[in-house]
Amino acid sequence: MLIDTHAHLNFAVFKEDKKEVIKRSLDSNVWMVNIGTNFATSQKAVDIARDYETGVFASVGLHPINLETGLVRRKIDNLEGDTFEKEFDYEKYRKLASSKKVVAIGEVGLDYYWKPKTTRKKELFKQMQRDLLLEELKLAKELNLPVIFHCRMAHEDLIKILKQQTTGNKLPRGVMHGFVGSTKELQKYLEMEFYIGFNGIIFKNIKGIDFSENIKTTPLDEILIETDCPYLTPPEAGTDRNEPIFVEYVAQEIAKIKNQSIEKISEITTQNARKLFNI
């Protein structure tokens, strides 16, 4: 058994065949958590999960790049659909996240890939993302749900925010989804007892990132596996669009790097996912 802890079958690209994709996954003994990136995709993730007694779960959240700041221009991702929101409606998200099919808040975090050019606008842009993150962390604490973190080109700020959250409070449980960062940054997240999610990006060559070393450094009992489908398709899949059953290729690569059997990787990562998401 495997659990794809970060899927997006709630995205527009799966509109016509998501039931078939889910059937293929469940028939292959692959469970999944579909991740919300705004209210519409969060609602879809919950709706999909409600159609299945087990094996399909949901997460609710507003992705930082989907916050309409008015400071940057970004094209709509046709795979995802129309995604932008001008503000985070706490009560609306809280009500949706109260569904028993919701196992986490996310994906939430910081993303500085698209940012304004001027210093003043850049700082305002970053502050708006930080404010959003704090609201979503508040929601996770209120509902006692783990957090699925997204972080791109912003680890220094995210680590600082998370450390500030420990003052007089206990950090929420969570996972660093699709971790792309240095081994030094990885160590800081491990010290805060977060799980680390690995997906198909480990098959890519990214300057300054040693995925093999990061996987070796992360204890097996702190690893989650994911696809981030429809993105980051492993090369062995032989298709452009990723889907949950291809999480096996991520597990196989981790097994090779860790010098462990695929059975061991499957067993431990499944236990990790069950523990974090209480499924």
Image (cartoon, helix red, strand yellow):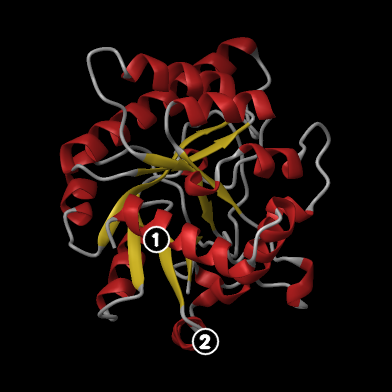
Disc 2 vs disc 1: Cβ atoms closer than 8 Å?
Answer: no
Q: Residues within 10 Å of mark 1 (few under 14, many from 20)?
A: many
Q: Quadrant of residue 31?
A: bottom left
> Mark on residue 24?
2
Residue 250, x across and y down, in percent: 65, 62
Q: Residue at x 73, y 75 (%)?
A: 237
Residue topped by disc 1: 41
Residue 192, x across and y down, in percent: 43, 27
Out of 93 and 262, give the one closest to the viewer: 262
Out of 267 and 69, give the one closest to the viewer: 267
Q: How many marks?
A: 2
- Tag nearer the camera, 2 or 1: 2
Q: Is residue 154 visible?
A: no
Which three-letter amino acid code belongs to the residue tagged 2?
Arg
Q: Quadrant of the C terminus?
A: bottom left
Gap between marks 2 and 1 measured at Cα: 22 Å
Q: Is residue 162 left or right of residue 167?
A: right
Precedes in sequence: disc 2 or disc 1: 2
Out of 262 and 141, give the one closest to the viewer: 262
Residue 58, x across and y down, in percent: 33, 62
Which three-letter amino acid code belongs to the residue tagged 1?
Thr
Q: Quadrant of residue 49?
A: bottom left
Q: Secondary structure at mark 2?
A: helix
Q: Residues within 10 Å of mark 2 (few under 14, many from 20)?
A: some
Q: Is residue 122 visible?
A: yes
